């Protein structure tokens, strides 16, 4: 029986997330050619002959969208549905990439930041990739120190709470967050003060700038609603 060989192209895609202007943002670039011209895509591209998928992901971020300050990158999974891209078969290895609030890459004209909760029309299955990346980040915020990759080097706890709230897409109680992270040894005080809401607040930093599991069974619970105020 005659066998037909269909070539398969492999690519790396990266969902780059950053906390900007009080919300989580996703980095996208606009497709200038068909298929799906005019839609917005995640950064990425075809693997080079002599590179692995993570090296390829980092190269495309640097070359195509000038993002070099990636504080953390990890593989999300493989997206391999036969028809995910029209034409030739394309298998994508997807990554989650995080950059700190202090990073401000000079983006090309066809590249922009978009609010994660208000994305434009995305190319192919890239909406599914973004959803997987946001879900991974939310999960890891509970049991690892992954927020180090989004936060500045030093911060007030109120600022860190805002990052957690944006990434989890729900309110986070600052007191509970400080207690949980302090108990796990995630944060350490710098001994300095920083202005927060117009008042001085204790400054903190992450004890580690590399990913580590802090409590593999932990879950950050939603903030309990406050009881209504009694009428006088």
Image (cartoon, rainbow, N blue to C red):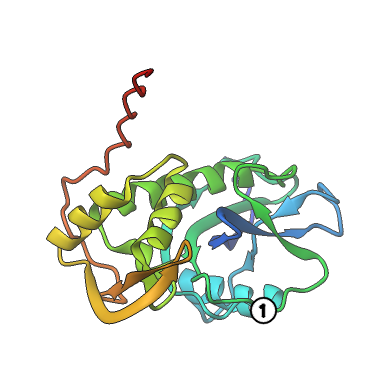
Residue drawn at x 67%, y 42% is 118
Residue 131, how many percent across, how many down? Answer: 52, 43
Pick whichever, 70 or 43, lies toward us.
70
Closer to the camera in the image, 225 or 124: 225
- Quarter occupied by the C terminus: top left
The percent position of residue 53, horizontal first and vertical second, equals 49, 69
Residue 61's place in the image compared with 131, above or below, is below
Identify the residue at image location x=86%, y=59%: 32
Residue 126 shows in this picture: yes
Instruction: From the viewer's perspective, tell me whether residue 152 is left or right of residue 140.
Output: right
* Category of crowding for the residue at label 1, using alpha-carbon neighbours closer than 10 angstroms: few (below 14), some (14–19), many (at least 20): some
Q: Secondary structure at mark 1?
A: loop
In this orientation, which residue lies closer to the viewer: 61 or 231? 231
Q: Which residue is depicted at the point 52% across and 70% down?
A: 101
- Which residue is identified by label 1? 66
Q: Is residue 2 visible?
A: no
- The mark tally for this picture is 1
């Amino acid at each position: 029986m005659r066998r037909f060989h269909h070539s398969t192209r492999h690519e790396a895609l990266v969902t780059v997330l950053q906390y900007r202007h009080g919300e989580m943002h996703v980095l996208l670039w606009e497709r200038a050619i068909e298929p799906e011209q005019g839609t917005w895509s995640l950064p990425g591209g075809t693997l080079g002959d002599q590179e692995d998928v993570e090296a390829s992901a980092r190269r495309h971020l640097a070359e195509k969208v000038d993002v070099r300050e990636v504080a953390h990158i990890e593989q999300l999974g493989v997206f391999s549905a036969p028809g995910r891209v029209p034409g030739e078969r394309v298998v994508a290895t997807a990554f989650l990439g995080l950059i700190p609030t202090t990073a401000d890459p000079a983006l090309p004209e066809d590249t922009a930041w978009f609010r994660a909760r208000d994305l434009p029309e995305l190319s192919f299955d890239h909406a599914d990739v973004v959803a997987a990346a946001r879900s991974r980040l939310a999960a890891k915020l509970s049991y690892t120190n992954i927020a180090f990759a989004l936060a500045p080097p030093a911060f007030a706890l109120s600022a860190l709470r805002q990052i957690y709230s944006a990434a989890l897409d729900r309110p986070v109680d600052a007191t509970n967050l400080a207690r949980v992270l302090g108990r796990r040894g995630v944060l350490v005080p710098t001994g300095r003060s920083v202005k927060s809401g117009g008042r001085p607040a204790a400054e903190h930093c992450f004890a580690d700038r590399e990913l580590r599991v802090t409590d593999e069974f932990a879950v950050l619970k939603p903030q309990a609603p406050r009881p209504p105020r009694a009428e006088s």
